[in-house]
Amino acid sequence: MADWGYIRKVLEQGNVAYCSIKPRYPGSWYEDVLNISQNTGLTVDRIKELNPDVFGAAFPQNDREYTLLVLNSGGDSGGEVPGPGTNPPEEGEWGNFVFDISNNQCPLPSGSYYISQHYGSGGHGGTDMACPNGTSVMAVQDGTVYTVQNWDGVTTSGNMSWGNMIVIQHIDNTGATYYSLYAHNSALQVAVGQQVTKGEQIALSGNSGNVSGSGGGYHLHLEVWSGGYGTGYRVNPENYVPM
């Protein structure tokens, strides 16, 4: 659901942190909030107290992909809770951008691709962008390389189905964490822990892993995760990345 190590660090500094939970039906949110409590040390009552609009009678159900919660480990429990960006950690710990469609960049050059499969089509967890082999793949936003997978050249099941794959972590100026995933590349050009900038070339497109389709199956599979990679949830890349 979240990068707990980062959130605990922010809370230890006495600053405000945020995390997100999926909207649930009334009365079924307790499991998510208990998980947050166990990972941050905040009590369930404290989390509810800080988010009265969320845990009131109008708790959102399925009208949004996520619900943002504010977390704060210090200060007077009464009074107004600062909004996003009003009490940030030390300079440089959060990005200077908002991770949304107006600020992010397309991962492929204009005119080099077409969308061959949309998010949600047949249960598809990302957006497929068909393009020639060796097309430049670029980071959609500033971030830190979180995962790099080198394909073994044979296996097309499990994680190896992604082939040569990169995951980048993005923490925007509200403290919200997103991850962008780039799969089926022919070559990778970054390493874990490397800082990348929006528009920087990180890979070359290809058909590694488990691919199919016309043109040799050459395409970029792009995913966006909110909260945590593998522990958060996928969101529609087309709502966050211009295509």
Image (cartoon, rainbow, N blue to C red):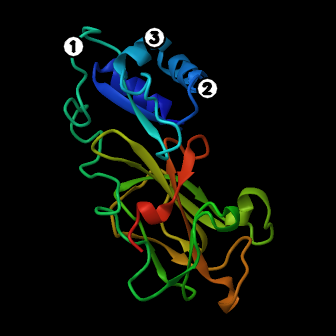
Say what secondary structure mark 2 lies in.
loop
- Tell me the distance, in whole angstroms, between the alpha carbons under discs 1 and 3: 16 Å
Report the residue at 58% width, 22% height from top. 27
Callout 2 touching callout 1 (CB < 8 Å): no
Pointer 3 residue: 45
Report the residue at 57% width, 71% height from top. 118
**Three-letter code for the amino acid on which mark 2 is drawn:** Ser
Judging depth in this view, the residue of 90 and 110 nearest the camera is 110
Tell me, for residue 79, which label it has, or none.
1
Pointer 2 residue: 28
- Tell me the distance, in whole angstroms, between the alpha carbons under discs 3 and 2: 16 Å
Callout 3 touching callout 2 (CB < 8 Å): no
Q: Tell me where residue 184 appears, x and y as whole percent.
A: 63, 72
Tell me, for residue 49, which label it has, or none.
none
Say what secondary structure mark 3 lies in.
helix
Judging depth in this view, the residue of 169 and 172 nearest the camera is 172
Report the residue at 42% width, 22% height from top. 56
Callout 1 touching callout 3 (CB < 8 Å): no
Judging depth in this view, the residue of 199 and 241 nearest the camera is 241
Q: Nearer the viewer, mark 2 or mark 1?
A: 2
Q: Tell me where residue 58 appears, x and y as whole percent.
A: 43, 29
Query: Which of the two labelled residues, at mark 1 and mark 3, occupies the earlier sequence position?
Result: 3
Local crowd at mark 3 within 10 Å, few (<14), some, or many (≥20)?
A: few
Residue 202 visible to the viewer: yes
Residue lying farthest front?
57
**Three-letter code for the amino acid on which mark 1 is drawn:** Gly
Residue 151 visible to the viewer: no
Q: Quadrant of the N terminus?
A: top right
